[in-house]
Amino acid sequence: MSDLAVRAAPARLNLNGLWVAPPLIVLGLTFLYPLVLIARAALVGDAGAIDFGGFLSVLHSRVFLNALINTGLIALAATAGCLAWG
């Protein structure tokens, strides 16, 4: 039996999950990076410290409230249309 030594198969690099990297990179560059820049511009004041004053003034504005209501109505109408069509 000692003449028939069993050799272990050489370890192979498993790249099965690597296909997800390019879409994540594209998503990060086209969506997440601009979103972080917008959030930084909204929350960081001129002195470089976090300042919620500008952010809160936008939340309390009538234009923002109207846009939020319109977005909700469009989402509801689109959902109802998809459910009716489907």
Image: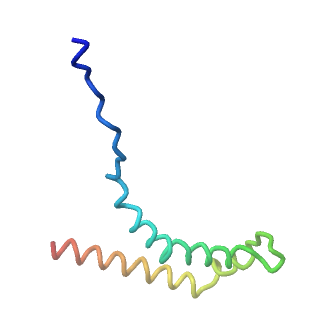
Q: Residue at x 26, y 20 (%)?
A: 5
Q: How many marks?
A: 0
Q: Nearer the viewer, residue 73 or 54?
A: 54
Q: Residue at x 43, y 80 (%)?
A: 71
Left or right: 7 as drawn, with respect to 73: left
In this rendering, the answer to whether 69 lies above or below 7 is below
Most distant residue in the bottom direction: 63
As drawn, 49 above or below 10: below
For the point 25% across and 23% down, the residue is: 6
Can you give x and y, in whole percent of width and height, for residue 15 in the image? 35, 52
Q: Quadrant of residue 3?
A: top left
Q: Residue at x 60, y 72 (%)?
A: 36
Quadrant where the image shows the C terminus: bottom left
User: In which image quadrant can residue 56 be found?
Assistant: bottom right
- Residue 39 percent coordinates (x, y): 63, 74
Q: Residue furthest top?
A: 1
- Residue 4, above or below 23: above
Q: Could you say where residue 18 lies in the image, as x and y percent from the top left?
A: 37, 57
Tell me where residue 32 appears, x and y as whole percent.
52, 71
The reply, left or right, for residue 58 in relation to residue 16 is right
View extreme (left): residue: 86
